[in-house]
Amino acid sequence: MGSKVIQAALIFFSVSYLGATVQGIEVDVKKSGAKADGKSDDTAAFKKAWDEVCKATEPSTLTVPEGKYMVGQIGFLGPCKSAITFNAEGAEFIAPTDLSQFKTRSGWILFSMIKDLTVSGGTMNGQGSAAWKINNCNKSFDGNCRNLPINLNLGTLTNSVVKGITSVDSKFFHMNVIQCKNLTLSKITITAPGDSANTDGIHIGRSNGVTVNGADIKTGDDCISFGDGSQQVTVENVKCGPGHGISIGSLGKYPNEQPVMGVTVKHCTLSNTLNGVRIKTWPASPNGVATGMHFEDVTMDNVSNPILIDQEYCPWNQCKTGVPSKIKISDVSFKDIKGTSATKVAVKLLCSPGVPCDKVELSGVNLEYKGTNGSAISECDNVKPTLSGKNSPAICDAAKAA
């Protein structure tokens, strides 16, 4: 495509900011060559359009009109010269099913090393059903699952917003947030079958100042998970289920993990999930810290293990059982957690005998078990929680608490 055609794709527009008017450009990906027919490979057109907005010296927009875009593995990379809006309202992105087309581990669609980015709208269809069949994570962490692509990878973004995104049938995690600062995710929709392996909805790690406000997540693993280095993160107004719940961790599997500090989860509803809100660490872990974790106003509807601290987390027997976790858990609160438990043990606090939990508070817990083998109970090891308000079931019989 010649330079005149490229220039024709650039529509100059004005935006008002604090009373000042600045000039930017709008690039229409169709005018950069995208067919949007769901069959043609539109990757090159997106790269061309991105290059134009990234080099613009004033705030600019990459517009993706309605249509179906077949897109291979692509990185929208910075640093860029000014703020960018990636507007894909009504557009659907379709991933390749051939895994050989994914040459790196950066995921399917990557936004990285960008400041002042806004991604608005769009559906990302990962076409993951074939990949789930070959996922062998239950046998080895060094297998194919590590190479399966994430639908949307957000890396090293600063002062950015992602809103109105829908992720469908990712081959692996739906969204991964890594090394970001001051990032807001809102109006997120995530959909995959309940038996789709390792399809975490939103995974957050090594990031500071992340907010998730408003998400509807149905998937085959954790709806939201927090890895090491998650700091000052707030999650609210999330609907989760099916899935494995909202989880901090797992932590402690690898050396040199960064502390988890300041995670708040509130105003959420979990339905028919395998876990509720939980913190999980591996036995025989290196030293680590997880502190300042608060769960408030969470409704459980037929949820297994609604409240869970598990410092004996050992899926598929890939750990040294019997060797205590060295992840120190402290300053944790569960407030106004209510609803129904699918398991008789509604509250389970299994802390490490090597580094018992400190400053764990429960207040206003009201969980009902409707099974035939009695009422809801709690189990506790190596923790002496502070209790306030009315709690049901009774929390941590003093004779059993450490």
Image (spheres, grey):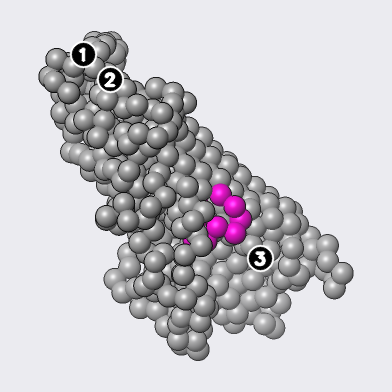
398 sits to left or right of 376? left
Residue 199 part of the magenta segment: yes
**Residue 71 visible (yes or no):** yes
- Write down the residue under mark 3: 305
Mark number, residue 8: 1
Picture coordinates of residue 281 (x, y %)?
47, 72
Q: Is residue 277 above or below residue 30?
A: below
- Which region is colored magenta? 192-201
Give amino acid for label 1.
Answer: Ala
- Write down the residue under mark 2: 31
Q: Please, what is the dominant secondary structure of the magenta stretch?
A: loop
Q: Residue at x 45, y 86 (%)?
A: 320
State the separation of the CA atoms marked 1 and 2.
8 Å
For disc 3, the neighbor class at 10 Å (few under 14, some 14 to 19, many from 20) is many
State the separation of the CA atoms marked 3 and 1.
58 Å
Mark 3 or mark 2, which has the lower sequence index?
2
Residues at marks 3 and 2 touching, judged by CB atoms closer than 8 Å: no
Q: Residue at x 36, y 72 (%)?
A: 142
Q: Is residue 142 above or below residue 269?
A: below
Give amino acid for label 2.
Answer: Lys
Foreground residue among 324 and 302: 302
Q: Residue at x 67, y 75 (%)?
A: 379
Mark 2 residue element? loop
Residues at marks 1 and 2 touching, judged by CB atoms closer than 8 Å: yes
Residue 28 part of the magenta segment: no
Q: Residue furthest bottom?
A: 322
Mark 3 residue element? loop
Mark 1 or mark 2, which has the lower sequence index?
1
Mark number, residue 301: none
